[in-house]
Amino acid sequence: MPDKEEKKIRMVLVGYGGMGKQYAGMMTDGGIEGLTLYGICCRNQEGQQEIRQRYPNVRIYEDTDHMFGHAREFDGILIATPHRTHVALGVRAFRQGLHVLVEKPVGVSTMEAKQLLSAHRQAVETHSPMSREAGGRSRYPAKPAFAVMFNLRMLPVWRKAHEMIRGGSLGSLTSALWIRNDWYRSPCYHRSSPWRSSWTGEGGGMLINQCQHDLDLWQWLFGMPESVRADLGYGRFHSLCVDDSVELKFQYSGHLRGNYLASSGESPGVNRLEIWGTKGRLTVENNETLTFDENETATDEFARINQEIYGKPAHQSRNIILEATDNTYRLMLQNFADHIRYGRALAVPGEEGLNALELANAAYLSSWFMEEIRLPIKDEVYQNALAAQVRLEKTLL
């Protein structure tokens, strides 16, 4: 077996902004076993100078053409660039047989994101493992890997909630209510980058940015709904063309109904998801606490046997003890490395990134057309509707 140095996966970070700088630090401090930061693609000269000072042994690629021109030097890329660049960068990487870990969202529309999924499937079919001979990249037994950085899935509270729901602890699910208005952002945030908080640059507002984390967790816990109805506020709290207030209703084929409320203009905010089932209620708060109010008798069974006019099931409340948490971004990077080196299952495979994006696209369609949108959405309809929003935005700015 090759030694640890031989086994290290050489990653190139694409983008050296806020998140990019955090990733650079994580991949150079030795905390990710089997993975090393080989290079950074950064067009900004000030950023390049900072990289030289902080990471003198890391290669600098001045643009993506320069980076992809040296693709045989490294094994994979981590995409931490503005949303609209994710798909094109990922497609080019897969054509070179590279591994890809992409920040959320996987794209801004399902039509574009499906191009990335198709490129990955083709890469898996056509690229075979390579060796380091003559400076070639090391592929190990793995074919090109594809994952999305939905790091909240790594938090113990969400992993335990997922386990309890899938294990039947709540019985048959009936309702879910998530209030998530602790995403407060001031105008300073919206002005921090020219592409931010716009249809043209970011492809939307809250739904395509902050809410992607929550929508991923929602579909991971409950699956994809049959339909979505949305009431969105555009510039409700800030001078924006995009959404900064979100109210969603999810309809499922069975008894389950879901509601999700979020905003970026209220403080202090709340982050609380309550899930009801026939066996009780599960409450997740602030991404860290989990409370189970467990019925002594399931509601459907109690309805069958109860003879009291105002009778209701007794219940016991208990806090679920959770394991200590680590930095979730590090856990995602480690998972990505372990998948490539040892075949460990990816925490968030690339194709699952499409689900949160489709929920956001469906919500926008519902808001624009003022109707309930059934899933799957019509990709071309959304693509055209988004383009219309971009054109309108340009006339207003």
Image (spheres, rainbow, N blue to C red):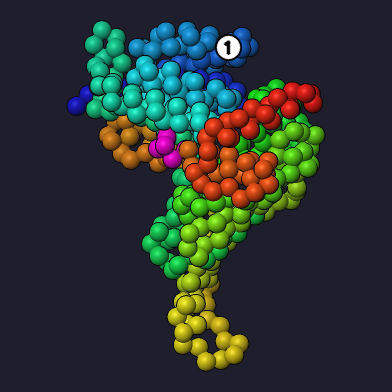
Can residue 183 be seen from the camera position used here? no
Quarter of the image that includes the N terminus: top left
Q: Can you give x and y, in whole percent of width and height, for residue 7 in the image? A: 29, 24
**Height in image: 305 above or below 10?**
below
The total of numbered circles placed on residues is 1
Which picture quadrant has residue 52?
top right
Looking at the image, which residue is at 37% across and 18% down?
A: 95
Farthest residue, direction bottom: 307
Farthest residue, direction left: 1
Can residue 89 be seen from the camera position used here? yes
Instruction: Identify the residue position indicated by label 1 in the image.
Output: 43
Looking at the image, which residue is at 57% across and 87% down?
A: 311
**Height in image: 369 above or below 342?**
below
Q: Is residue 396 magenta?
A: no
Which picture quadrant has residue 54?
top right
Q: Is residue 351 magenta?
A: yes
Looking at the image, residue 139 sits to the left or right of residue 356; the answer is left
Q: Can you give x and y, in whole percent of width and height, for residue 252 in the image? A: 51, 57
Looking at the image, which residue is at 57% across and 54% down?
A: 250
Looking at the image, residue 201 sits to the left or right of residue 104; the answer is right
Disc 1 marks a residue whose amino acid type is Arg
Q: Residues within 10 Å of mark 1 (few under 14, many from 20)?
A: some
Q: Secondary structure at mark 1?
A: loop
* Magenta-tinted stretch: 349-353
Magenta stretch, overall SS: helix
Looking at the image, which residue is at 74% across and 40% down?
A: 234
